[in-house]
C-alpha cells in the first residue's frame, strides 16, 4: 500500500475531447521506505502515499510501527463496515478525534456511543432535507450579494476562489445557524481561524501508532489556542444572546435551544450547544467551500461543460436569479457538483477504529485497528467508474446511479452526513447563481495541486480571474 516516493509528487492535467483529466498525483514506484518514513510522508499530505495499484477493488492490510491498518476499497466491504457492522466501527479514528476535540469538543462529528445516539436525531432533524426550502432564500440572497461584489471588481479581476467560496459559505451557514449576519469581519475570523487550525494540526497521531489505542492529545500550542479562542468567542457570544432572548427565531441554534427546553435530559448546556453549533458551522462551511472551489477549477478547463451549464441556467431561470425551487430542474448543475465530489471529496479519508476483532473480506481485523475507507481511492477506481480520473459530469445524468457504496462523498450508513441535502442544495444554488453571471478562469500559469490535511483543498488556494458573461443581466 504505502510507498515512499523516490522523487517529489508532481501533477498533471490533460484535455481529451469532452473529457478533462484534472490535477492528480503522478504515481511512482520508487524503493520502499520504512514505516516511519511512510508515516512522516502522510503527515505532510495523505494523498501522496498511494500507489497506482491501490486504486482497485480490494481489502488490504499493512502494519506501521505495530499498528494494523486495513484499507477497504470494495463497495460490498464498505457496506459491511459502515452499515452491517456499524456497531463495531462507529468510532472515528483517534487521529480525527484528537485533531478536532479542542475545536468541537463532543460535537456530533467526533462523538460516539450514547452522546452520538442522543444528539444524532436532534441534529438530523434540524438540517433535514424538509427544512432546506426555509433556508433557500438565505443561500440565494447571500450568493446574489457576492455577484454584486464581483461585478464591482471589473472584468478580469483576480481573486482567490477558495477564500471567496469560504466567505460565501461561512455567511450562508452563519445566517442559517445563528439567524443573523456575522458580517465580513467576523466571518473572516471564523474562516481564517479554521484554516489556521488545519495548518497547525497533524494529520497523523504518532502516539496511536506507538501503542496508545486512543492516541495522544494534540499539544495545545499558543497558536492553536489562539485559533480556537477566536472561533469559540464568536460562537459563544451568539449562543449567549439566544439564551438571553436576543436571538433570531427559526435559526438552527434557536431550534437547538428550543429542543433542549422541551427535553432537558439532552443536557445541552452552553458548552454542548457551542459544540454542536461549531460542528454544524464547520462541516457546512468547509465542505461546501471546498466543493465549489474544485468545481470552478474543473469548469475552467472543461469549457464544454461550462457551456452546457450556462445553457441550462438560461433555459431554467432566464434572466431571473435562481432559487431553491429551481434546484430540481438544474440537472446538469447537479451533475457537475456530484462529479466534483467524486473527484475531490471534501473529506477524502473516512477512518474508523475497530472495537473488537473481526474479519473484513479476507483480512482478519485486530481490536483497535485503523480501518480506512478512502473516497479518494474508491471514487477513482476504474472498475467502478470508467475513465475514473476524467471529469465527466454526464455519468450522473439519467436514471443510473453508481454502485451502492462506491460513491460516498458524505460518508454512508448511520453516520452519513445529516446535512447532505443542505450541502448539495447550497452547492447547486450557489454555483448556478454565480455561473449565471460569470466565467471563472484559473490564473494562467498556475499549477493546481490537491493536498489533504483535515479536508481536501488546493495548495495555496485557487487564484482565478472573473469575467462577466456578456449575455447576463445585472
Image (spheres, helix red, strand yellow):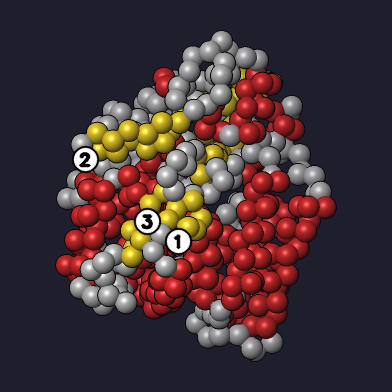
Relative placement, left or right, of 443 versus 303 is right
Q: Callout 1: few (<14), some (14-19), or many (20+) C-alpha neighbours within 10 Å?
A: few
Q: In which quarter of the image is residue 186?
A: bottom right
Secondary structure under tag 3 reads strand
Q: Callout 2: few (<14), some (14-19), or many (20+) C-alpha neighbours within 10 Å?
A: few
Secondary structure under tag 2 reads loop
Q: Where is residue 208 in the image (x, y as percent from the top left)?
A: 70, 32
Q: Quadrant of residue 333?
A: bottom left
Relative placement, left or right, of 271 versus 7 is right
Q: Name the residue under label 3.
A: 440
- 195 to 80, vertically: above or below: below
- 381 to 33, vertically: above or below: below
What residue is shown at x 68% (from left), y 40% (from top)? Answer: 202
Q: Which of 247 and 115 is in front in this view?
A: 247
Q: Nearer the viewer, residue 11 or 351?
A: 11
Residues at marks 2 and 3 touching, judged by CB atoms closer than 8 Å: no
Q: Position of residue 162 (x, y in %)?
A: 50, 55
Q: Where is residue 102 in the image (x, y as percent from the top left)?
A: 72, 54
Give the alpha-carbon distance from disc 2 to disc 3, as whole Å: 19 Å
Give the alpha-carbon distance from disc 3 to disc 1, as whole Å: 10 Å
Looking at the image, is mark 3 or mark 1 earlier in the sequence?
1
Q: Mark 1 points at which residue?
A: 157
Amino acid at each position: 500500500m504505502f510507498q515512499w516516493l523516490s522523487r517529489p509528487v508532481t501533477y498533471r492535467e490533460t484535455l481529451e475531447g469532452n473529457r478533462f483529466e484534472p490535477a492528480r498525483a503522478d504515481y511512482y514506484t520508487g524503493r520502499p521506505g520504512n514505516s516511519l518514513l511512510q508515516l512522516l510522508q502522510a503527515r505532510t499530505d495523505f494523498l501522496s502515499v498511494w500507489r497506482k495499484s491501490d486504486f482497485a477493488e480490494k481489502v488490504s492490510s499493512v502494519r506501521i510501527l505495530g499498528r494494523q491498518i486495513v484499507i477497504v476499497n470494495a463497495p460490498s466491504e464498505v457496506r459491511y463496515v459502515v452499515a452491517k457492522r456499524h456497531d463495531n466501527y462507529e468510532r472515528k479514528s483517534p487521529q480525527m478525534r484528537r485533531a478536532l476535540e479542542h475545536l468541537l469538543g463532543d460535537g456530533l462529528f467526533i462523538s460516539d456511543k450514547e452522546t452520538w445516539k442522543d444528539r444524532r436525531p436532534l441534529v438530523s432533524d434540524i438540517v433535514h432535507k424538509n427544512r432546506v426550502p426555509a433556508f433557500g432564500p438565505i443561500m440565494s440572497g447571500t450568493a446574489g450579494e457576492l455577484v454584486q461584489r464581483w461585478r464591482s471588481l471589473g472584468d478580469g479581476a483576480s481573486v482567490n476562489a477558495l477564500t471567496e467560496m469560504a466567505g460565501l459559505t461561512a455567511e450562508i451557514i452563519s445566517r442559517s445557524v445563528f439567524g443573523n449576519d456575522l458580517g465580513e469581519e467576523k466571518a473572516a475570523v471564523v474562516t481564517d481561524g479554521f484554516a489556521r487550525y488545519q495548518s497547525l494540526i497533524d494529520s497523523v497521531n504518532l502516539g496511536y501508532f506507538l501503542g496508545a489505542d486512543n492516541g495522544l492529545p494534540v499539544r495545545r500550542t499558543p497558536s492553536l489556542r489562539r485559533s480556537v479562542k477566536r472561533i469559540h468567542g464568536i460562537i459563544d457570544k451568539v449562543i449567549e444572546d439566544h439564551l438571553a432572548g436576543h436571538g433570531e427565531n427559526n435559526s438552527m441554534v434557536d431550534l437547538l435551544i428550543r429542543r433542549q427546553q422541551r427535553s432537558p435530559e439532552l443536557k445541552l448546556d452552553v458548552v454542548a450547544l457551542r459544540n454542536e453549533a461549531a460542528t454544524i458551522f464547520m462541516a457546512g462551511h468547509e465542505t461546501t467551500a471546498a466543493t465549489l472551489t474544485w468545481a470552478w477549477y474543473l469548469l475552467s478547463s472543461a469549457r464544454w461543460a461550462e457551456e452546457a451549464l450556462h445553457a441550462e441556467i438560461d433555459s431554467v431561470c432566464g434572466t431571473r436569479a435562481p432559487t431553491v425551487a429551481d434546484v430540481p430542474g438544474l440537472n446538469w448543475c447537479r451533475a457537475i457538483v456530484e462529479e466534483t465530489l467524486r473527484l475531490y471529496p471534501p473529506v477524502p479519508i473516512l477512518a474508523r477504529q475497530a472495537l473488537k476483532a473481526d474479519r473484513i473480506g479476507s483480512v482478519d481485523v485486530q481490536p483497535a485497528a485503523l480501518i480506512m475507507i478512502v473516497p479518494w481511492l474508491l471514487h477513482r477506481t476504474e472498475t467502478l467508474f470508467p475513465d475514473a480520473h476524467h471529469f465527466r459530469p454526464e455519468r450522473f445524468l439519467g436514471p443510473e446511479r453508481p454502485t451502492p457504496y462506491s460513491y460516498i462523498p458524505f460518508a454512508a450508513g448511520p453516520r452519513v452526513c445529516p446535512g447532505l441535502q443542505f450541502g448539495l442544495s447550497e452547492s447547486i444554488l450557489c454555483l448556478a447563481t454565480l455561473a449565471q453571471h460569470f466565467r471563472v478562469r484559473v490564473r494562467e500559469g498556475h499549477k493546481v495541486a490537491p493536498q489533504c490535511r483535515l479536508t481536501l483543498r488546493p495548495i495555496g488556494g485557487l487564484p482565478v480571474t472573473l469575467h462577466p458573461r456578456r449575455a447576463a443581466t445585472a
